[in-house]
Amino acid sequence: MILALLLVMGCDVDFTGLERIDTFAEEAATSLQVTEVICPGADTLAVGDVGSCEARNASGTRLFAGDFDLIIWESSDPSVIVVNVDGGYEAVAVGSADVLARGTDGSFASDTVTVQ
């Protein structure tokens, strides 16, 4: 009602601040999208090795611990590699499996891990 009154009175209303808020919100959401998973040394693991995978966004920025509540980590084959909620892993048997990071926005990426 106030907006209608201002328009009727001939006052100019500046909505550019709202556009900037929308742009900021969109950029923030995009910055948390998972587009890449990196598991260092993933092709040379031995049974019993432990390590940690990293999730990255489209800019290549690592998504840190504070973002982990927005990322779900899983293994395509837990009999080969077990992954915890922080992206940490343990190689438990010889074979290959994918470590997958899934964002709550539906984005996901994976890295293939080979245990020799």
Image (cartoon, rainbow, N blue to C red):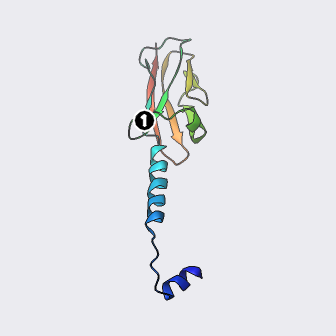
* Percent x, y of residue 107: 48, 45
Give above or below for 4 relative to 25. below
Q: Is residue 97 above or below residue 6?
A: above
Q: Picture coordinates of residue 13 (x, y %)? A: 47, 75
Q: Residues within 10 Å of mark 1 (few under 14, many from 20)?
A: some
Quadrant holding the N terminus: bottom right
For the image, the number of numbered tags is 1
Q: Amino acid at mark 1?
A: Thr
Rendered location of residue 7, percent (x, y):
49, 84
Q: Residue furthest left?
A: 59
At a point 46% along the width and 33% down the height, the residue shown is: 62
Secondary structure beneath disc 1? loop
| Of the pair 112 and 85, the residue shown nearer to us | 85
Q: Please, is residue 6 above or below residue 17 in the view?
A: below
Q: Report the residue at 61% width, 39% height from top.
A: 69
Q: Name the foreground residue: 49 vs 56.
A: 56
Residue 112 x/y as whole percent? 44, 27
| Residue at mark 1 | 61
In depth, the one of 96 and 43 nearer the eye is: 43
Toward which corner of the image does residue 93 lie, by quadrant?
top right
